[in-house]
Amino acid sequence: MQEAYLDNNATTRPAPEVIEAMADSMAKVFANPSSVHRPGQQARKLVDDAREKVASLIGCAPAEVMFTSGGTESINTAIAALLKVRKPRNRIITSAVEHSATQGACELARERGATIVEISVDQQGALDMDQFRRELAGDDIALVSIMWANNETGVVFDIPAIAEECRRAKVPLHCDGTQAVGKIPVAVRDVQVDMLSFASHKIHGPKGVGGLYVRWGQRTAPLIAGGPQERNRRGGTENVPGIVGFGVAAELAKQHLPEMTEVAKLRDYFESQVLAGIPDSYVNGSTEHRLPNTSNIGFSRLESEAILMLLSERGVCASAGAACSSGSLEPSHVLKAMKIDPKIAHGAIRFSLSRYTTREEIDYTLSVLPEVITRLRQVLPVG
């Protein structure tokens, strides 16, 4: 059976060079990078080399990059650290469309006494900058935590403008860059964010390893206490093979970044064919300010879960921004915040491409998707 993997915002397929480098490091360099003996220093060099490659991708100094277990840990570390070092300020400004990692970290902070302010978005997914400026005027703001690009719609926020407002208010800015890094240019020093979270498996690297950029001079605090690893910012022995793979993935992502324009063309071709061939289908979110690889399409009067099941049976992997709760499938909080018509939001599917996505995969998906939608509309009750 032919297959098409269009779920690259969740996890990208690992680059062959990454797999080779990780296997080589596991076979040849197995010592603890904190050890002073020669094998330990060989491991240390691998970690340091990877840190330089990751730093180069996001435009910062290697010392400003700390390695974590992934984007979720990076986000939790940034929010908890800034909240701690900014006491007694206890108000966090975020958006209504953040990833569940940010939402969870903010909810935990709320349980511990913090006040959470969510900035709304319009129907295109753009942040309400007027509301943001009003909320930022308070003197009790501990931090701002705003994503660079949305994981469901691909909509890109105006981070340079947000960062400028934060600098003017003297409030630190943490940015969830998990979806943006490796897909669009991200230069943290130019934009002047204070912290940036990101993950290896979004750029064809291994799962279970991530990064947190901490601007030089920005006060922070460890989330995980223990040894002096990561310049006393995260205790625990480093995941050397994962970090090596992350470094190779970062190097490749920087090298292949210009190719994302071709990915965007393939995405646009896919969308045009879907909209032309399937009635009552709609692109959710801005088609101008978004990632080059992401397409969120709503199929009216259907449930995304049913669409995904039939697509999977035909070898097409996609995803839906929905959470199953108490046996009922609810539209994602992102589409709710955008005030997308529930008839469309319930049937929203995210198709996400990568530099490995082929025209053959897209054409195969286009050959099965209309039949899937037609079949479901014939058998399911009209809402």
Image (spheres, rainbow, N blue to C red):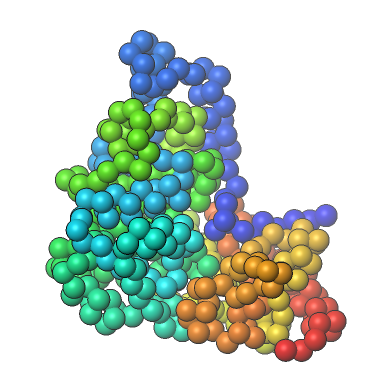
Which residue occupies the foreground of this view, 62 or 332? 332
Answer with the quarter of the image where residue 87 lies.
Answer: bottom left
Left or right of 308 in this view: 30: left
Q: Position of residue 303 (x, y in %)?
A: 71, 76
Q: What is the number of callouts on the image?
A: 0
Which residue occupies the foreground of this view, 174 or 108? 108
Q: Position of residue 292 (x, y in %)?
A: 48, 65
Residue displayed at 39% across by 60% down? 111
Residue displayed at 36% across by 10% down? 37
Residue 328 shows in this picture: yes
Which residue occupies the foreground of this view, 267 or 36? 36
Where 365 sits versus 233, above or below?
below
Where 345 sits versus 151, above or below?
below
Residue displayed at 46% across by 31% down? 239
Which residue occupies the foreground of this view, 146 or 290? 146
Left or right of 14 in this view: 360: right
Answer with the quarter of the image where residue 132 lies.
Answer: bottom left
Q: Position of residue 65 (x, y in %)?
A: 31, 41
Q: Position of residue 81 (x, y in %)?
A: 29, 49
Outermost residue, right side: 379
Q: Quadrant of the C terminus?
A: bottom right
Q: Quadrant of the N terminus?
A: bottom right
Residue 291 shows in this picture: no
Left or right of 361 in this view: 43: left
Answer with the quarter of the image where residue 295 lies.
Answer: bottom right
Residue displayed at 64% across by 86% down? 343
